Image: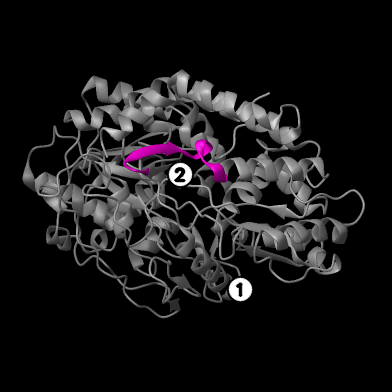
Amino acid sequence: MTTITRRSALALGAGAAGSLALAACSNEGRGVPPGQDPGPSGGNGGSPETLQLPTTVPLPEIEGVSLSSVPGVPPAFTSLPHPGTPSVTQKPGRGGEMDTFTITWGAPPKLAEDGNKWHQAINEALGVALNPVIVPAQTFGDKLVTTIAGGDIPEITTNEPSYRGRSARKYMPQGVFHDLREFLGGDKVLKYPNLSMIPAPAWENSRIGGALYGVPCCRNETVGGTIAYRQDWAERGGFGDRPANLDDFRKWLKALQEGGGDGTYVTATLDQTLSMCGLQVHKVCNNWTVDGGKLVKDHETEEYEAGLAFARQMFADGLVHPNMVQLTPNPAEYRGQFYAGTVAMTNQNLDGYFGPNGELAQLSQRDADAKAEIMVPPGHDGGSGSVYPDLGFYCMLSIPSSVTDPDRIDEILGVINFLAAPMGSSEYFLVHNGVEGHNYTVEDGQIVPTTDEEIRRESFLSQLGAFTQGFYFAGAPADHALQAQKVAEEMVPAFVADPTVGLDSEASFSKGDALSTIVNDYEVGIVTGRREMSELEEMRKRWRDGGGDEMRGEFEEQL
């Protein structure tokens, strides 16, 4: 049986990557750490002489914001002053309509003509009527490809080049969409102040062939790489301190199980067991590493072998839930094991631990005496283990090259600038929350969304407004944002770059699914004892012969 993990999804091609995105919603392990040079063109073939990224300016300081002294750590918002300060001085639209294309994960939303007050308010604020095509997630990739092939491409098109829209990625260097360096490169972006606040890593990591085929919908790079664990179990087991190295870590894992008592386990999934306890602790590289100008795959390294052996021993020692294979692809089930007090650990995007519905709150609702904490796994030789940064963006908003009127392009960029309004601005509240008194109310300074299901269907922007910078948890204690920021301050210095970020490989598209399946089957087999450690070399050979070396060569040509 194949058990797909978030880590193994990195090697997938278009089809499998699309199907997994619903569960993972993460491109963790593909980014470039803040301040780290991704290469002369971000590792994607552009020329330093022709490539000019947009300038990035700091976010405005507002009441309730806490800025970290660690570069690359997002701000924390303990509150958002309502109704906020305008970030746009005039309506960007010039009347008429503007076609858009985006995605939905639920039922089709109501639109303005159906009485959607949120949509109507957006149109009024923009000065142009958005005419959205909203596609279900399950068919988004196919619909995007057929839309491009048909030639009638909406003026703002959501592209997901690393997710469901991966199959459309190959069209981007073919001139289908504008290279936005022409309009936003360097200080040109300052004409659109909200776009100038998009963090540099989002621009860097969204390049394809050196070009910017869309405005990246930015999000925090601090997504995955942490674990939540039962600190009260560790204390009862006699190891209340944080483990500092591999020897400590072994003792700490056993203390967690002893503190939990009979019938408890430390981990529930392959991710937690292999990726977090094995590979991160042994400081395995991020997908690939460069040695003497040549690419080495993560599973070809000695660190990977040591991490795999460690995970195998954990399973043999009874620290891993015996239903690991079944639990791994089912977040609701493995998180349920954590809430029920059966396993000591769970993992989630950093934001997902906090807030009124986060992991910590869910645990507390079921066991008021439970004490959980969050940490970055330690390194085997001290310090922090490897953390694989998110790309810093989820999708991009592209403008088709069929739009040639400079004034119209300026209008479209103005609309995107409005949608990218920063947290704490009045436009942000409209884009993300809707109309006050209808879609939400404000109680004690907190946003309270409506519970009316019909009104909730008015949320229609989806990825068109998916710009997020910082930590803010409405309805939660103010210190939740500060706690998230503190964890991020541990994560960012441990970031490890993927040298292939932004590179394309035909072999990865055509053979990536099969290669990932091979690796995953061996990982599951070796960890559970169904296969011997000696079979690792067989796995490596099958991967190389099955297309891995071909993929390596295609990537190396672009380094």
| Residue 299 included in the magenta stretch of the image | yes
Q: Which amino acid type is marked by label 1?
A: Pro
- Percent position (x, y) of residue 500? 35, 40
Residue 253 image-quadrant placement = bottom right
Q: Residue at x 47, y 19 (%)?
A: 546
Query: Mark 1 near mark 2, Cβ–Cβ under 8 Å?
Result: no
Q: Which residue is mark 2?
A: 27
> Which one is in front in this view, the residue at disc 1 or the one at disc 2?
2
Q: Residue at x 25, y 20 (%)?
A: 149
- Percent position (x, y) of residue 393? 38, 50
Q: Which residue is mark 1?
A: 477
Quadrant including the N terminus: top right
- From the viewer's perspective, is residue 119 above or below residue 71? above
User: The residue tagged with tag 1: helix, strand or loop?
Assistant: loop
Classify 10 Å Cα crowding around label 2: few (below 14), some (14-19), many (20 and above).
many
Quadrant including the C terminus: top left
Classify 10 Å Cα crowding around label 1: few (below 14), some (14-19), many (20 and above).
some
- Horizontally, residue 375 falls left or right of residue 499, namely right
Q: Which amino acid type is marked by label 2?
A: Asn
Visible in this render: residue 17?
yes
Q: Earlier in the sequence, mark 1 or mark 2?
A: 2
- From the viewer's perspective, is residue 94 above or below residue 376? above
